[in-house]
Amino acid sequence: MFRSNRRTRRAMFTLLAVLALFLSACSQKMRDQPKLNPDEATTLLPGGTASQPIVADTVPRGYVNDDVEFTTGKDASGQLVTEFPFPITKQDILRGEERFNIYCAPCHGHVGNGAGVVALRGFPGPPSYHQDRLRNAPVGHFFDVITNGFGRMPSYANQIPPEDRWRIVAYIRALQLSQHADVKSLPAADQQQLQKVQSGG
């Protein structure tokens, strides 16, 4: 009886020891997983980090869009489009204003005159949206510049999806109109109000 209890205890102890080894090994593997975190340094991949650039001419799953004008701002022949690829609503312009103030205003200024805070601190400023060249530019030009960059301006394609790029372009058009509206096109009440402001009354 005494020996039987002793053997049982010894077997239980051995079993517990084996289980402890298995559990500790499992815990170690869970803690030290064979993976790389984003931007973690590594010699396994080009560039020295785990994050790698997207392979050229590839599209992430779920992002395929065959609408050339919508995704490039150009038609099938490569010419810049002159019209928006979808109807622009007030909500689109408000969304465009929000995105413009986040991504564009620091350089272009809140009214699009090229006098943003970056330019005011000595960095060369971008051109004003209110010059004739840009007021007469097709909407596809602005979309293309946001997508691919231009001069010192980098591409914003990774930060701003195509829908919001078009909304920003719509807001740029609204800014241009705000500075160059034909007074005669305003309602009579607004024309009278403007005349009062101009006359100092």
Image (cartoon, rainbow, N blue to C red):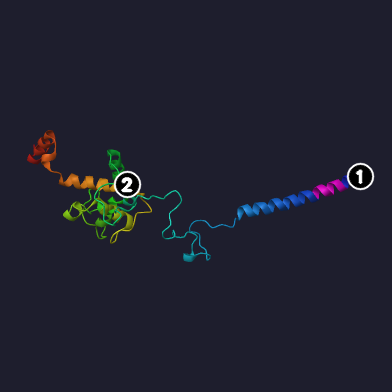
In the image, residue 153 sits, relative to residue 167, either above or below, namely below
**Residue that mark 1 sits on:** 2
Q: Which quadrant is home to the C terminus?
A: top left
**Seen in the image, is 102 located left or right of residue 57?**
left
| Region in magenta | 7-13
Label 2: few (<14), some or many (≥20) within 10 Å?
Answer: some
Q: Position of residue 142 (x, y in %)?
A: 27, 53
Mark 2: which secondary structure?
Answer: helix
Towards the viewer: 110 or 149: 149
Q: Residue furthest front?
A: 77
Q: Position of residue 143 (x, y in %)?
A: 29, 52
Mark 1: which secondary structure?
Answer: helix
What residue type is disc 2 on?
Answer: Arg
Q: Position of residue 86 (x, y in %)?
A: 30, 44
Query: Disc 1 vs disc 2: Cβ atoms closer than 8 Å?
Result: no
**Residue that mark 2 sits on:** 99
Cα gap from disc 1 to disc 2, whole angstroms: 81 Å
- For image coordinates 34% across by 46% down, the residue present is 163
- For image coordinates 18% across by 52% down, the residue present is 136
**Seen in the image, is 97 located left or right of residue 26?**
left
What is the chief secondary structure element of the magenta stretch? Answer: helix
Can the viewer see residue 101? no
Towards the viewer: 16 or 170: 170
In the image, residue 123 sits, relative to residue 169, either above or below, namely below
